[in-house]
Image (cartoon, rainbow, N blue to C red):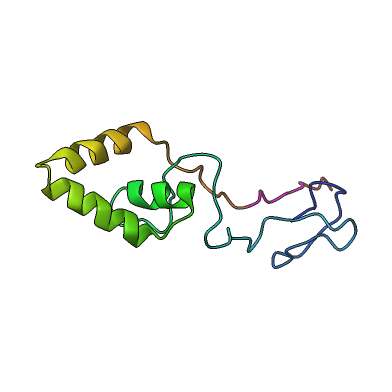
């Protein structure tokens, strides 16, 4: 893995560049209770489609609270929560895939 800011080679476990101090993005997770600026469905920490988890992450609350609220809305008034959940499932985008860093292979000619 290479630093995107200064270009030196780093080990896979490094969280910061030893040369310039830039974050590598490895092992970084959002702090609990932190508010995201974009409403999206996470690829991790989801139970069904990630709608409740995404809404909870956006507002900075516990996902269990949002799941209980969604369940209450699904029961009373009849079906409103189910319709809202399905609409959010269709409208809310997924988080982008976290792809591994590309491996640089150099062919040597003898």
Give residue 52's position: percent from left, percent from top.
Answer: 34, 50
User: For the point 63% across and 64% down, which residue is it?
Assistant: 27
- State left or right for residue 30 relative to residue 63: right
- State left or right for residue 68 relative to residue 52: left
**Residue 8 or 84: which is nearer the viewer?**
84
Give residue 22's position: percent from left, percent from top.
Answer: 81, 54
**Residue 54 or 72: which is nearer the viewer?**
72
User: For the point 86% across and 63% down, which residue is it?
Assistant: 18
Q: Which residues are magenta?
A: 101-106
Verify whether residue 82 appears in magenta.
no
User: For the point 41% across and 48% down, which residue is it?
Assistant: 54
The quadrant in which residue 47 appears is bottom left
Counting labels gives: 0
User: For the point 39% across and 36% down, which residue is it?
Assistant: 92
Q: Main secondary structure of the magenta part?
A: loop
- State left or right for residue 2 relative to residue 58: right
Most extreme residue toward the bottom, as rendered?
13
Quadrant where the N terminus is found in the figure: bottom right
* Position above or below: 10 against 39: below
Most extreme residue toward the front, as rendered?
77
Give residue 106's position: percent from left, percent from top.
Answer: 77, 47
* Position above or below: 73 against 30: above
Give residue 37's position: percent from left, percent from top.
Answer: 56, 41
């Amino acid at each position: 893995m290479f630093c995107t800011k200064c270009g030196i080679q780093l080990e896979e476990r490094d969280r910061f560049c030893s040369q310039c101090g830039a974050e590598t993005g490895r092992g970084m997770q959002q702090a609990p209770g932190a508010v995201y600026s974009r409403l999206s469905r996470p690829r991790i920490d989801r139970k069904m489609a990630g709608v409740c988890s995404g809404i909870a992450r956006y507002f900075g609350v516990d996902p269990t609270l949002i799941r209980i609220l969604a369940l209450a809305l699904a029961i009373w008034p009849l079906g409103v929560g189910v319709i809202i959940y399905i609409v959010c499932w269709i409208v809310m985008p997924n988080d982008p895939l976290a792809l591994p860093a590309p491996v640089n292979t150099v062919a040597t000619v003898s």
